[in-house]
Amino acid sequence: MVEYSYQEAVDLLNQNLSQGKESLVIVHSELDTLKDRITETEVNIARVINWNIREKRRTGGSSAPQR
């Protein structure tokens, strides 16, 4: 086990705290980006579903896949 002097321990803890805060800012930024991507994906899924419904109505409601 490694022993630190009081000042070395305080310096190490302050450095770890600073790095942790920087990492937290990055994680929050990436989380915001991920939330935006999820929203975009949900919108695109809704568009595909709506298109499929319109196509079924247009073709007379056939549930067989079109080729």
Image (cartoon, rainbow, N blue to C red):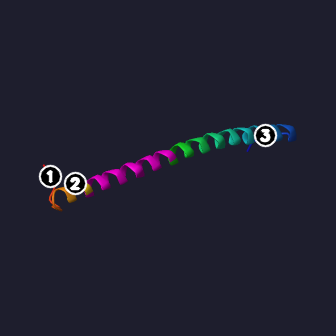
Distance in Å between CA atoms under marks 3 and 1: 64 Å
Q: Given this view, does label 1 or label 2 mark the residue nearer the observer? A: 2
- Picture disc at residue 14: 3
16 in relation to 58, above or below:
above
| Residue type of the residue flagged with mark 2 | Glu
Start and end of the magenta stretch? Answer: 36-53
27 in relation to 46, above or below:
above
The residue where tag 1 is placed is 66
Q: Which of the pair 1/36 is nearer the observer?
A: 36
Query: Residue 14 vs residue 25: left or right?
Result: right
Contact, mark 1 vs mark 2 (Cβ under 8 Å): yes
Residue 61: % across, % down: 18, 62
Residue 64: % across, % down: 14, 59
Residue 36: % across, % down: 50, 45
| Residue type of the residue flagged with mark 3 | Asn
Q: Which of the pair 27/7 is nearer the observer?
A: 27
Question: In terms of sequence position, does the residue under pointer 2 or pointer 3 come before the other?
Answer: 3
Which residue, as the protein is rendered here, is positioned at the far left?
A: 67
Q: Residue at x 14, y 52 (%)?
A: 66
